[in-house]
Amino acid sequence: MPKPHVLQMGSYPDWDQAPMNAAYQMHAYYAATDKAAFLAEVGPHIRAIATNGGAGAAANVIAACPNLEVISIYGVGYDAVDMAACKARGIRVTNTPDVLTDDCADLAVGMVLALARGIVPAAEFARADWTKGSFPLQRRVTGMKAGILGLGRIGQQVAKRLAGFDMDIAYSARSPKDVPYTYLADPVALAARSDVLIVTALANAHTRHIVSGQVLQALGPKGLLVNISRASNIDEEALLAALETGALGGAALDVFEGEPHLNPRFLALPNVLLQPHHASGTVETRRAMGQMMRDNLTAHFAGQPLLTPVI
C-alpha cells in the first residue's frame, strides 16, 4: 500500500523525523528554495500537513493541496493555520495540548524569579568583578500581586505555582472560572492591580495586542511583564517604548515578532530578560509532543478518532 504524502512545514528532531519518514512520503516544504514551484509539483499529492505553531499552514499552502485531509501541529498554538480555510473544506486540525503545560508554567515562574531578582545580571556581576561592591538590591517575589492574562491550562498551572510564593493572584479570561483567584474582565484593571503580569492567553483576533500601551501604562514603572504565549498578544512597539522610557519596570519575553530576528532595540535594554522561544523546550516534553503529533496522523489514516482535535 503506498505511503500517504505529507507536507512538512518545519524541521523535527531525529526521534520524530525517522518514524515520519518510515510511515509517510515526506515533502520538506521548509527546505525548498522555490516554494511556489515546490507546492505546484507536490501539492496535488498531499493528504496531510505536519507543521508547528510558528510555521502553521497559510491559505496559499492549503489551497495548493486540493486533497488535503488533516493538519497535525507540533505545539498548542494554531493561530498560524488558516482555520477558516480548513473549516470551509472540512480539513481536520490537531495540536498537542497538555503535554507541554507543565514546562511552560515552570519557565514562566522561572522568568518571574529571574526578572524580579536580577538573576542573569547578578551572574554576570559575579563573573566580572564582585570586589568593586555589592550587587544592587532587587525585588521580593514572595507576596507579590500577580495577574494572569488568560487562565487556560497553562495559566492555571502558573497560578498553582505562584500560590506557593504566597502571591495574591488575579486573572482575566473570557469568563470567570471556578478557581480561588480574583476575576477581572478588563486587562487594564488587571494590570493596575498587578506587580507582575503574566501572559498565557491563546493568540487570535480577539487577543491581538491585548497587552496594549494602556495596559502597560496601568502596569506602571514598577510593574513587570512576562510573556510565554504569542508575540502578537503584545503591542511590541508600545512595549519597547515603555521599557526605553521607564514607563514599565521590566519584561521577560520568550516570544517576539519576527523571531528569530529580534528588534535590535531589545538588545540595548537592561530591564528585559530575553528567552529563545523555548517554554516547551525539554527533551521529555518535545518527545511527548512529537509522539502526539504522529499519533494524530496515525489515527487519521487508520480511520480512528483523532486524539486531540481542534476542528
Image (cartoon, rainbow, N blue to C red):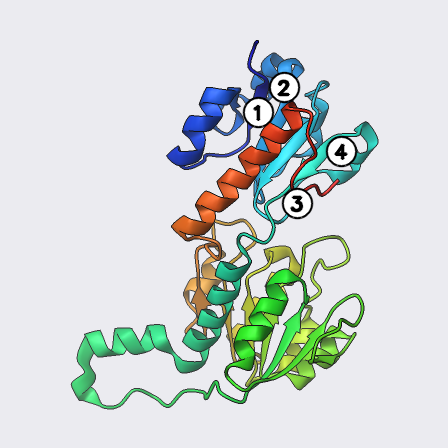
Of label 4 and label 3, which has the lower sequence position? Answer: 3
Q: Which residue is mark 3?
A: 78
How many other residues sit within 10 Å of disc 3, few (<14), some (14-19) or many (≥20)? many
The x, y position of residue 53, in whole percent, is 58, 44
The x, y position of residue 109, in whole percent, is 49, 71
Q: Secondary structure at mark 1?
A: strand
Residue 294 picture quarter = top right
Mark 1 to mark 4 CA distance (whole Å): 15 Å
Of label 2 and label 3, which has the lower sequence position? Answer: 2
Do the CB atoms of the residues marked 1 and 3 lie less than 8 Å apart? no
Mark 2 to mark 1 CA distance (whole Å): 6 Å
Given the image, on which type of amino acid does mark 3 rest? Tyr
Q: What residue is at 31 percent from the left and 78 percent from the top?
A: 122
Q: Which residue is mark 1?
A: 7
Tell me if I can see residue 251 in this picture: yes
Do the CB atoms of the residues marked 2 and 1 lie less than 8 Å apart? yes
Q: Could you tell whether 206 is left or right of 6 in the image?
A: right
Q: Which residue is mark 2?
A: 46
Label drawn at residue 86: 4
Of label 1 and label 4, which has the lower sequence position? Answer: 1
